[in-house]
Image (tube, rainbow, N blue to C red):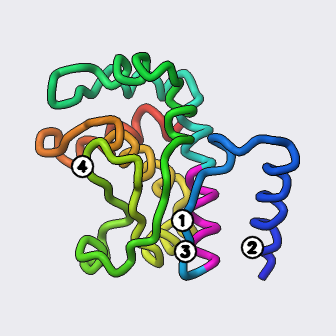
Amino acid sequence: MWRHTVLACTLVSGILTGRASAETPILFPFVEGDTQFAVRRAAEGAADRLARHACRGLFDHFTNPSGQRLSTVLAAKGKSPAEAFGLLRFADESAAPQCRTGHTLAFTHVGSPLIRVCGLQFRDRFAWDRRTAEVILIHEFLHALGLGENPPTSSEITKQVAARCAQ
């Protein structure tokens, strides 16, 4: 119950101060309140990581299918990584086939601003290892910016995100 109170205070604070961008990610309705809380906090942590100088090299490392660096994609949008991350939307897709294995925490389609979260798995990982939950959201953000997969493998993407953004 305390988490719901904290979440409500966070939302009201964001509304009253006019800060509703990267600090207050947009979440579509989640079935389970603790899951929504975990996704919101992980998204806020990921946005904080993306604002760090060390993390910015990540966007020079990866390219979209046309060979354009993701840093160039961001520059064309006129957004910093944290600002562009703040435009993402998050939805609980616990019933999706990708979530049935129990190993996937989140997924998206290349170029889509909608990050689909495997709710209960994500909530449990966040409770156990917040850093990894934040890294996974940054991983999905790269796909939203246009990064494909295979190559690079999912594991290679996550390793780069962790190495550059998880300090």
Q: Amino acid at mark 1?
A: Phe
Crowding at mark 1 (Cα within 10 Å: few <14, some 14-19, many 20+): few
Which numbered disc flags the more N-terminal residue, 3 or 2?
A: 2
Q: Would you say the magenta stretch is mainly helix, strand or loop? A: helix
Q: Give the residue at x 59% y 66%.
A: 38
Residue contact between numbered discs 1 and 3, judged by CB atoms under 8 Å:
yes
Residue contact between numbered discs 3 and 2, judged by CB atoms under 8 Å:
no
Picture coordinates of residue 95 (x, y %)? 34, 81
> Is 34 in the magenta?
yes
Q: Amino acid at mark 3?
A: Phe
- Please say if 49 is above or below 14: above
Q: Amino acid at mark 4?
A: Ser
- Please say if 23 is above or below 125: above
Q: Give the residue at x 54% y 81%.
A: 31
* Residue 120 in the figure: left or right of residue 70: right
Which numbered disc flags the more N-terminal residue, 1 or 4?
A: 1
Q: CA distance from mark 1 to mark 3?
A: 6 Å
Label 4 sits on a secondary structure element that is: helix
Q: CA distance from mark 1 to mark 2?
A: 18 Å
Q: Which is more foreground, mark 1 or mark 4?
A: 1
Give the labeled residue for mark 3.
Answer: 30
Give the labeled residue for mark 2.
Answer: 3
Residue contact between numbered discs 3 and 4, judged by CB atoms under 8 Å:
no
Read off the magenta span.
33-43
Q: CA distance from mark 2 to mark 4?
A: 32 Å
